[in-house]
Amino acid sequence: MIYLKSLPTFEYFSPQSLKEACSFLKAHENGAKIVAGGTDLLIDMKYRKVTPRYLVGLRTLPELSRVTFGDQEGLRIGAMVTHQEIMDGPIINEKFKSIALACSQVGTPQIRNMGTVGGNVCNAAPSADSVPPLMAYSATVTIAGAESDRVLPLEEMFIGPGENCLKAGEILAEIRVPVAPPHTGAVYVRLPARTGKDIAAVGVAVLITLDPTSGACNDVKIVLGAVAPTPIRSRKAEAALNGEKPGEDLINRAALLSADEAKPISDVRSSLDYRTEMVRVLTGQALNQALAIARAS
Amino acid sequence: MKKLIQLKINGETAEVAVEPRTTLLHVLREDLGLTGTKEGCGIGDCGACTVLLDGKPVASCLTLAVEVRDREVLTIEGLSKDGELHPLQRAFIDHFAVQCGFCTPGMILSAKALLDRNPHPVEEEVRQALSGNLCRCTGYVKIVEAVLAAAEYMQSQ
Amino acid sequence: MKESSMIGKNVPRLDALEKVTGKAKYSVDLNLPGMLHAKVLRSPFPHARIIHIDTTEAEKATGVKAVITGRDVSEEKIGFIRDRYILARDRVRFLGEAVAAVAADKVEAAEEALELIKVEYEELPGVFDAEEAMKPNPPVVIHPDLYTYALAPNPTPLYRFEPDMPNVYIHRQVLQGDPERAFRDADMVIENRFFMPSAQHAAIEPHNAIAQPEPDGGLTIWISTHQLYLFKLNLCRLLGLPSSKLRVVSLYIGGAFGGKSGLAVPAIAGLLASKSRRPVKFVLNRDEVFLDGNNREAMTLCVKDGIRKDGTLLARQMRLILDAGGYSGTTALVAKNAAFGAIGTYNVPNFKLDSYAVATNNPPTGPHRGFGSTEVVWAIESQMNMIAEKLSMDPMEIRRKNLLREGVVDSLGMVTHSIGAGECLDKISDWLGTVPATPQNEGAWRKGRGIALCNKYTIGGTDSNVFVKVHPDSTLEVRHSANEIGQGCDTVLAQMAANEFATSIDKVKIVSCDTAITPYEEATVSSRITFHAGNALLLACKDAKNQILQIASKKLEAPSDSLEIKDGVVYCQGDKAIRIVDLFSPKGFVPGGGEIMGRGVFSGPRENEDPDTGQGKRPVTYYAHGATAVEVLVNIETGEIKITRIGSCFDMGQPINPKLCEGQMEGGMGMGIGGALFEEIVFDKGLTRNASFCDYKIPSSIDFPTKENVISLIAPVLHSEGPYGAKGLGEGSLLAVAPAIAEAIYNATGVRIRDLPITKEKILKGLNLLRSSS
Ligand SMILES: Cc1cc2nc3c(=O)[nH]c(=O)nc-3n(C[C@H](O)[C@H](O)[C@H](O)COP(=O)(O)OP(=O)(O)OC[C@H]3O[C@@H](n4cnc5c(N)ncnc54)[C@H](O)[C@@H]3O)c2cc1C
Ligand code: FES
Ligand code: FES
């Protein structure tokens, strides 16, 4: 039994620039951690799952709290943008509804005011709600380093439950979401484990771009949350749909393939069997909803 | 190591010596004697520790005091002005929305944040806005009624 | 009875203003000068021998002022069966049991010091399943000396030990009539097995206490509890203090529901305060509340009924198995009292009950809103629905047919009095509308409706005292020791006092819950305060009024029976009158230099029960009755359940303040929804796997239907002994919710759930089973 305690001691560092933050992290290797909203990290610290010597706060860096949009460069979300800001963002609601919707379903109002999308990604929980729709949009992450920056597909951020690919001295600075082509539908369907406000038992994001003339799928992304060590693409299901005209049978088949690709666990929230079955049900729902939007657009 | 920081709490500036690990909740309750803010879980689940930080409800049990520097904090003690109850407080009394009262301060502050943003909420919006504040006593019925009544009253003013 | 201007009125709560402004004080809000903070070290094993504890390093740690272990606690133990030391001595019997405690100047220092305590354990095999534990040859005997333990004072030991079942704390039996014969005579026998899991009260305020050493060598302890005087009695025993040297105080209580009943928290604070000679505050973290917060036990219930074709119940046999955990707590008593809930609604001429409280190495358990009734009502009401179905009868009809009625002797031998169950059923089914015979579909959603009944007994033989002091300004100071846990007892008692003195509510001042100044009250449990403290209050008012009338009669030179008190004035027939303030003139005291202080003592009725049959003429004081109606939508693809409508109707006798009654009903429905759908403490070989609100979910505002789809109705049937005919309500409101929801789900989907909570997954499993069998 791991007991809850008061926060352990640490030093708090407030950098003047992103580079300074990276250098500090690098200099202190495993001893320093970023604190964003603290809604994951401080709890882990209270349970002594981590006991960093230094916390590096990013509040002083306004560039990380920006949301911008351009037709060419798409949507750019700073790592420190909160779930509430995303769900309230006019552009995001207009053009990237599934992302706004996912963030609106994170935790509670308090948690959404505190928790950031960067924290959600970096914390690398399999159930992180912002991740599946972002991945479905083929989002990339901009990672700042002490020496150099790099850009990765969001998908490649995740290594395992709670494990991301950041190296010492690296900070997630920004998430970029490209503009999807016309005739695209994107959705996020989520089933809370128990109460209405519970962490997701299963979350499914789907993005479908249709060929307007043939009605066939030009591009399909299916991302499953909470049912594998990391959020995963359901590639077999995507492959089954790509290039095809999706009808009821095909959708059912794709949903079954997704269920097959899921590798859930049993925990106090949900069992493996139930999660697997829900991947099928939710994938079917998500595909139908996304198709309806794509067809209507 | 303790650092002196300045906080703006209920419109007044307070200077407190805090360690980096000191939470805002701790500063309020232990250093400033503002015990209207409660602790029910310590990990963001119950909302008893809700305060408004720059007008937004946050869990003060997960907020580092050092990060609150120069920001505005509103606690339940700061809600009534010159002895005049806020309409929400009035409505909570009139609608029997209080039982044990332990959730009440956080509940009222979450409701205030809602009404500040959205003066005419529908019931579903009220329920969503209060969904981070657990109440074990009331079943929420009278709380929701109180918030809607306060909204109506404020509109009529 | 007098014209009542106060009774049945929605007087605003006296405590509301303080509570909405953040000024209301709870014990956890107190900070005393020089105060230390306590933390305890808990056993990592569910069952182990303690070989050695070394606290030397911890004692030397910075900020640490006192460290105690089992060696420092008295021989006195706690529990219904006195089986537990405040800190474990030679053995730990559950994972999370306190083995040492530290007081330090900061919480953090206390936490760090715990890590320096070295405990050497020898792990013992454990038993985690009550049915396995109760076998004649269990894998392990948890309390080898069980039969040598002392027992809590209890007038009738209506239970027995079972030497052949060494892990059974107690076995309670009831026998009425000849059930075996009745089963043979019955047209149909139906038998089912039900389960209700362990649950947490989840009061939002965690358990806490602050102990302060006093100059006379005694202690003052502020405690978040609902058992002020019971705590005082026990803490005197545990701390070795005479009654005169222990003062126990409660401020507002941030929710209780039975949970604030463990003695370990105040006792540890008290021991550390005595040792350090400093005030000590001990607040449990939420996870500790889950481990040692007197959770409701898990109960398995087997119910066998014999029925005639026309739906008449001939016989009922129940077997209850309670997983009490490593210590008996109050669960041994729950096992006993569960019998009351089992017989309180229906007329069952032949009845047998065997109830076993079983020791396991799960955490110990205690009282939870309902005290055994939640569990038995769940099983019995579900069973009634199944019987109705088998007989193709309307579930309402079968209930009406078998209801106890005024004057009928129930299965425990008590004459039924004040039973509004039928009225509740009628009113709530009118509100709900007809239960559709076939489910209604909306896409993947199926709609269903269900109703269940319940009863809640209030224990017999308990006492209340109230003082009413009348100030010269005619303010009535009501001194009582019922805990304001949110139910509104301060307001209800104030209303009664104002009514008795024909004055307004602002003329009543409440002084409560301080053993130095407020009188004995048995405990704020069992929905007994309105009735018991209310009756004591009426007597105290009568006494105080008599004192006033005596003096006034002299001053007015009129016989006291010609006088009447109203709005702070004593009136005489004709036009003579005297203000209460003038009774105190000229010295500020009433003639003779005294004050006006009325005292009321009320002793609840009890007649001892027969140890063989478990029966008695007055085993309980009264029953409150109620019914809950529910409409649900169930998604047959995901198993999701939406409660779309929920309503309750209760007979609590005369409602003193209907809005407060509504509050209890709504709160009960909220807790009931949680218990029906979400709440279950999950154990894995004694390890609590969900000791947080993140992993143990209670309903939030969005798990409740919209306000126009919730109703709380009242169908009062007055009780001849109650104050103004009042009974009680607090607990009952929870009981019928789970069976009503289960019935609504069955109505919607055909899936019958016998094991709570009703998870999405269980619905889907049930649907799959139905599909494969059809
Ligand atoms: C009550 C409650 C309910 C919740 N419900 C949900 C839910 O429904 N869905 C959901 O997805 N999550 C939920 N969460 C989890 C949490 O709120 C989210 O994951 C949130 O987005 C985390 O963001 P944060 O800013 O608080 O992260 P922090 O806690 O500050 O950080 C999390 C981790 O990420 C690292 N980190 C943060 N930012 C960066 C960066 N820019 N670069 C590098 N590393 C970084 C930190 O070092 C830390 O390891 C819930 C939490 C609580 C307490
Ligand atoms: S105490 Fe902060 S959310 Fe519970
Ligand atoms: S009033 Fe008790 S928790 Fe809300």
Image: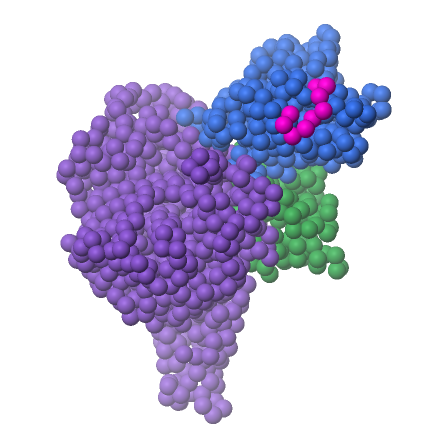
Name chain A's colour: blue
Query: Where does residue C26 sit, x and y in percent of width and height?
Result: 48, 48
Seen from the viewer's position, the closer of residues C200 and A192 is A192
Instruction: Identify the residue at image location x=61%, y=28%.
Output: A252
Q: The magenta stretch spans which residues? A: A242-250
Q: Quadrant of the N terminus of chain A?
A: top left
Q: Is residue A131 above or below residue C148?
A: above
- Identify the colour of chain B in the image: green
Type of secondary structure dominating the magenta stretch:
loop
Residue at image x 70%, y 15%?
A: A153
* Residue C355 shows up from this direction: yes
Q: Residue at x 14, y 39 (%)?
A: C163
Of residues C114 and C136, the one drawn nearer to the viewer in this rendering? C136
Q: Position of residue A121 (x, y in %)?
A: 64, 22
Which residue shows up at 57% across the image and 28% down it?
A: A280
Determine whether, in the image, residue B107 is placed left or right of residue A220: left
Chain letter for the purple colouring in the rendering? C
Q: C709 and B132: which one is in front?
A: C709
Tell me if residue C54 is in the magenta stretch. Answer: no
